[in-house]
């Protein structure tokens, strides 16, 4: 079994491209709206949800104007993003405090807010997870353990699409629609002597990501979402 992370830390993982930054902050805003873990109070006077939503909207509008090459919009976009970065520092601190106070569900709390988890673990064993990549609509899926693996995907966990089996515990899927949420699961290929069970379904919202396929480069996790 894999070792549980000793330290769980909330991080934003802001993309480098402006269009992806717009999607990123909108996703965080959406996740924090009517969030079960952060219903009221927020940072208790330091930053209100109303102010954060307004700052997100201001940045999105200025980013769109800059994309349309409106005079002066680039500077306004950069200023709006600087304001938003300050907001996000407070959001991260708020989410981190809630996660620290509830260590048993820390990862769920962090990801419910649209943030990502950076943790230190006792080993690097693969888990049942899905990741967005730098290629739009292309995701990586990994399975717990190694060896030949079977894969399935579904939008509702009822209508199931079978994916090609692989010789390793890693595969990829392309051509997915941005913004859609897919569920994936895996299991080891059955042998004559043993039959394996499917893993629980694990979800992913297709969006911006930073994990490359193949060797080289920086591999950063992006996009794993809880079902709650």
Image (spheres, rainbow, N blue to C red):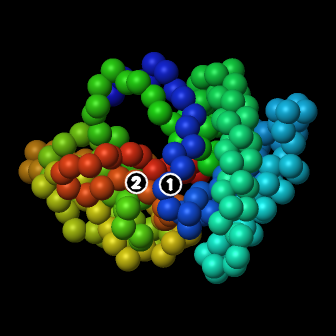
Label 2 CA crowd tier, 10 Å (few <14, some 14–19, many 20+): many
Q: Residue 190: in sight, yes or no?
A: no
Q: Give whichever of discs 2 and 1 has the lower sequence position.
A: 1
Please state if 76 lies on the left or on the right of 134 as rendered.
right
Image quarter of residue 9 = top right
- Front residue of this view, candidates 4 and 55: 55
**Residue situated in front as seen by the camera: 87 or 71:** 71
Residue beneath the point at 45% across and 68% down: 154
Q: In this view, does 43 lie above or below 12?
A: above
The number of numbered discs placed on residues in the rendered structure image is: 2
Q: Residues within 10 Å of mark 1 (few under 14, many from 20)?
A: some
Quarter occupied by the N terminus: top left
Residue at the location (57% across, 43% down)?
A: 12
Taking the image as drawn, is residue 28 in sight? yes
Q: Which residue is labeled 1 in the image?
A: 15
Query: Is 208 placed above or below 82 here?
Result: below
- How far across and down, in percent of the image, does residue 34 sit? 80, 51
Residue found farthest to the left: 192
Tell me which residue sits at (30%, 55%) in the image: 212
Q: Is mark 2 on a helix, strand or loop?
A: loop
- Tag nearer the camera, 2 or 1: 1
Instruction: Give residue 113's mark.
Output: none
Percent coordinates x, y for residue 181 in the rendering: 53, 65
Q: Which residue is drawn at 26% across and 58% down?
A: 213
Residue nearest the viewer, comparing 131 with 62: 62
Residue 71 sits in quarter: bottom right
In this picture, is 23 found above or below 120? Answer: below
- The residue labelled by disc 2 is 210
- The span from disc 2 to disc 1 (Cα, nearest Å) is 8 Å
Evaluate if marks 2 and 1 touch, with contact meaning CB atoms under 8 Å apart: yes
């Amino acid at each position: 079994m894999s070792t549980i992370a000793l330290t769980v830390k909330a991080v934003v993982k802001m993309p480098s491209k402006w269009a992806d930054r717009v999607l990123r902050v909108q996703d965080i805003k959406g996740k924090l709206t009517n969030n079960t873990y952060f219903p009221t109070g927020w940072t208790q006077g330091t930053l209100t949800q109303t102010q954060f939503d307004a700052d997100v909207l201001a940045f999105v509008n200025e980013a769109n104007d800059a994309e349309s090459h409106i005079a002066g919009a680039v500077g306004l976009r950069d200023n709006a993003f600087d304001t938003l970065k300050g907001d996000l520092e407070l959001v991260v601190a708020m989410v981190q405090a809630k996660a620290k106070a509830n260590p048993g569900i820390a990862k769920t709390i962090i990801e419910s807010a649209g943030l990502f988890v950076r943790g230190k673990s006792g080993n690097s064993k693969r888990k049942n997870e899905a990741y967005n990549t730098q290629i739009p609509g292309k995701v990586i899926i990994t399975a717990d353990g190694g060896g030949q693996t079977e894969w399935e995907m579904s939008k509702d966990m009822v209508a199931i699409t079978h994916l090609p089996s692989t010789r390793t515990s890693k595969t990829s899927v392309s051509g997915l629609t941005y913004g859609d949420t897919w569920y994936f699961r895996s299991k080891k290929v059955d042998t004559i002597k043993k039959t394996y069970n499917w893993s629980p379904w694990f979800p992913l919202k297709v969006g911006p990501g930073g994990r490359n396929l193949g060797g080289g480069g920086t591999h950063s996790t992006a996009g794993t979402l809880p079902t709650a």
